[in-house]
Amino acid sequence: QLLFPELDVQLTSVSDQWAQFSVAGPNARELLKQIADESEDLSNEAFPFMGAREVALRGGIRARLFRISFSGEM
């Protein structure tokens, strides 16, 4: 507004288009394997700590998966 008042810029928030779920516990990886597409490799080696990537869920839905743990557990 101050540097380029001649520009007509509009921003649209898309954050309400996303949902977030926390899946934690000793069976979290097995649960994710049941809802992720069979082609997705969710092994410890293929999806390391602090990893993030887009994955396919069963039914053709795309999702963003983040492996984040603040407790340091698997």
Image: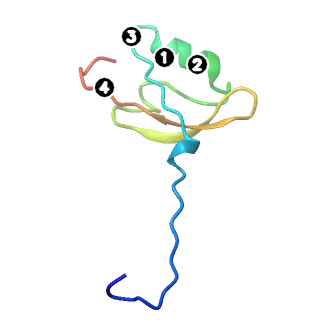
Instruction: Report helix, strand or loop for mark 1.
Output: helix
The vertical placement of 21 against 25, above or below, is below
Q: Position of residue 24 (x, y in %)?
A: 40, 16
- Residue tagged 2: 33
In the rendered structure, the answer to whether residue 30 lies left or right of residue 25 reads: right
Mark 1 and 3 residues: CB-CB less than 8 Å, in contact? no
Q: Which residue is mark 1?
A: 29
Q: Of discs 3 and 2, which sits in the foreground?
A: 3
Pointer 4 residue = 69
Distance of mark 1 from mark 4, alpha carbons?
13 Å
Residue placed most toward the observer, 1 or 15: 1
Q: CA distance from mark 4 to mark 2?
A: 18 Å
Marks 3 and 2: CB-CB under 8 Å? Answer: no
Residue found farthest to the right? 59
Which amino acid type is shown beneath numbered disc 3?
Gly
- Secondary-structure class at tag 4: loop
Q: Residues within 10 Å of mark 3 (few under 14, many from 20)?
A: few
- In x, y percent, where is residue 22? 43, 23
Residues tagged 1 and 2 counted as in contact (Cβ below 8 A): yes
Q: Nearer the viewer, mark 1 or mark 3?
A: 3
Q: How is the image coloured?
A: rainbow
The label on residue 25 is 3
Q: Amino acid at mark 1?
A: Arg
Residue 4 in picture, x, y percent from top left = 39, 89
Q: Are marks 3 and 4 in contact (CB under 8 Å)?
A: no
